[in-house]
Amino acid sequence: MTEQKLDRQPKSTTGKTTTGKTATGKPATGKTATGKSRPEGNPKFLWRSGEMVEWDKATVHLSDLAWSAISAVFEGVRAYWNPESEQLYIFHLDAHLKRLFQSMKIMRMTSAFSKDELTAAFLQLLKANECKGDTYIQPLAYFGGGVPGYMAMLEQPGEIVITTRAAASGLDEAKVVHCNVSSWSRITDNVMPPRAKAITNYQNSRYVSTESFINGYDFGIILNPNGKVSEAAYACIFLIRDGVAITPPLSAGILESITREALKDLLNKEMDIQVIERDVDRTELYLADEVFICGTAVELQSVGSVDRYKVGDGEQGPVVGRLRELFRDVVLGNDLTRSEWCTPVY
Ligand code: PMP
């Protein structure tokens, strides 16, 4: 691609002109390619392997930079602030910690901290940072100490770091994104296991996102090497067709998504919609009545088009609309039948 082409910022199909600079090859300016600023201001503390550390004092040696990333696994967790009850609820903390331990196990990394100790660390950190608003929490586990990351490391404890940042929920409004089916394939279990939430897996997502961005789409949908739909760049996918919800199975190369499980439950039990996990063909996306993506970061967003084929009427459909309301109720701690999904902080 020529420099001239790269300089022209792709126009998103949502109508917003993207303003990011990194696709031009200029140094990163703190903005992502989609123009979103990195959050300003850091929290007071992070949690590092058992200790609360002031943000600016939490340093590692520069030589650790690349090698520690190779083994690193993480979680993205959201906590939702309920202004009525003045309470902060961590969504599905148990499930996220369980998945963190699973990812660590795949990396042959042990934890010096139990699930209960990490739960206490989450609560301690959120309180110390005085988080009273929607918050994104990221625990990260890695082999430190500058050991070249390609070397065998058998069952040794990883460093664990937990950070928080403000991240407003978008569940109060309908969001419609426009997607392409990526020319990149999804990583596979025997190459880079997608069920491990490993930092390195996100190079696959990044190839996909970059291609989508350059071509003016919001999100890429990835097919696995069998040509079946796997997931979106960093979110899972559902389609609604003839009153049934369909989502690719865990064996399609997806992350074992916590949001996907929660939405399956709501669709089934609250909306009486059958959920089928099966292989999905690309053209089914074009013909679906509704398509949506889901995940901790994206929450729940309608897909208005795929490869410029309009999905339904191109807007948020009725199933997604209702599901978004139900999901919002759950994460705010208002659905008392699912209060065990929400851990109160205060
Ligand atoms: N797939 C990928 C690759 C992701 O990064 C995410 C976001 N964590 C998801 C799916 C959705 O997973 P979850 O609902 O657990 O956030």
Image (cartoon, grey):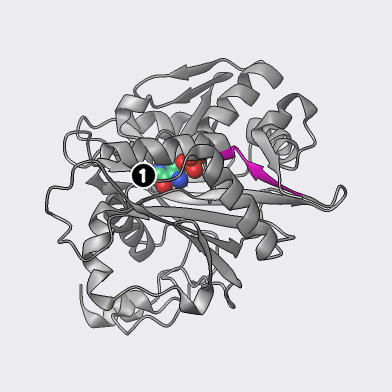
Residue 291 in sight in this render: no
Residue, disc 1:
197
29 above or below 151?
below
Residue 264 in sight in this render: yes
Task: Identify the residue at image location x=22%, y=74%.
Answer: 63
265 above or below 293?
above
| Quarter residue 155 falls in | top left
Mark 1 near ligand 1 (CB under 8 Å)?
yes
Q: How far across and how far down the image is residue 72, in percent?
A: 31, 53
Front one among 64 and 280: 64
Task: Identify the residue at image location x=74%, y=60%.
Answer: 132
Q: Using residue 274 as the reference point, say whether residue 25 is left or right of it.
A: left
Q: Using residue 320 as the reference point, say whether residue 203 is left or right of it.
A: left
Front one among 247 and 196: 196
From which residue to which does the magenta span run?
88-93
Front one among 21 and 52: 52
Q: How far across and how far down the image is residue 345, in percent?
A: 71, 48
